[in-house]
Image (cartoon, rainbow, N blue to C red):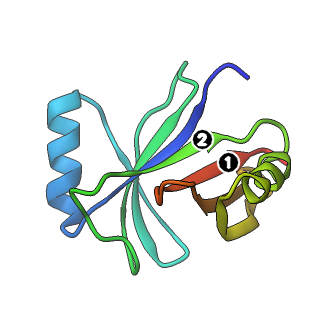
Amino acid sequence: MNSYISIFEIPVTDFARARQFYQSILDIAIEEIEMDGNQMGIFPSDDQLSAGVLIKGEGYQPSAEGALIYLNGGNDLQVILDRISASNGTIVVPKTMIDEENGYFAHFVDSEGNKLGLHSPS
């Protein structure tokens, strides 16, 4: 495992404003797509181990409480999900396929009450 962070999402309410802000401060181009009814802006990830997106959609609310971080789930995130249950964590979204190309994700609440995600190719 080369990186502990796989994907990060930044919730937004005004997609155009947020996209412009991040493109401006990071001097990057953010590709806009729609997935499952969500408006998304994909950060370039050339030669990086982690990827990030801006996301506008139902259930995504910007908050000072923190961003939802996806940890690298290794080859199969189910191994980590099994450990979460055994370590006083709670699985919120079980292992769920994104699509064939992008693999799987899951959400969990840790022992302290923090919501995090996992991502793996299988």
Give the mark nearest the N terminus, 2 or 1: 2
Badge nearest the viewer, 2 or 1: 2
Q: Is residue 12 above or below residue 83?
A: below
- Quadrant hosting residue 49: top right
Q: Is residue 65 above or below residue 120?
A: below
The residue that appears at 48% across and 78% down in the rendered structure is: 37
Q: Is residue 113 above or below residue 74?
A: below
Q: Which class describes the residues within 10 Å of circle 1: few (<14), some (14-19), or many (20+)?
A: many
Give the amino acid at mark 2. Answer: Leu
Whether the residues at callouts 2 and 1 have beta carbons within 8 Å, the answer is yes
Image quarter (top left, top right, bottom left or bottom right) of the N terminus: top right
Q: Position of residue 102 (x, y in %)?
A: 70, 50
The residue that appears at 77% across and 36% down in the rendered structure is: 74
Q: Which class describes the residues within 10 Å of circle 2: few (<14), some (14-19), or many (20+)?
A: many
Q: Position of residue 110 (x, y in %)?
A: 57, 55
Q: Position of residue 12 (x, y in %)?
A: 26, 63
Foreground residue among 23 and 69: 69
- Quadrant hosting residue 95: bottom right
Q: Secondary structure at mark 1?
A: strand
Q: Is residue 108 left or right of residue 32?
A: right
Give the amino acid at mark 1. Answer: His
Q: Position of residue 96 (x, y in %)?
A: 75, 66
Foreground residue among 55 and 32: 55
Residue at the disc numbered 1:
119
Q: Secondary structure at mark 2?
A: strand
Foreground residue among 62 and 113: 113
Q: Is residue 86 above or below residue 94?
A: above
Q: Is residue 95 left or right of residue 114?
A: right
The residue that appears at 23% across and 29% down in the rendered structure is: 26
The Cα–Cα distance between marks 2 and 1, rounded to whole angstroms, is 6 Å
Residue at the disc numbered 2:
71
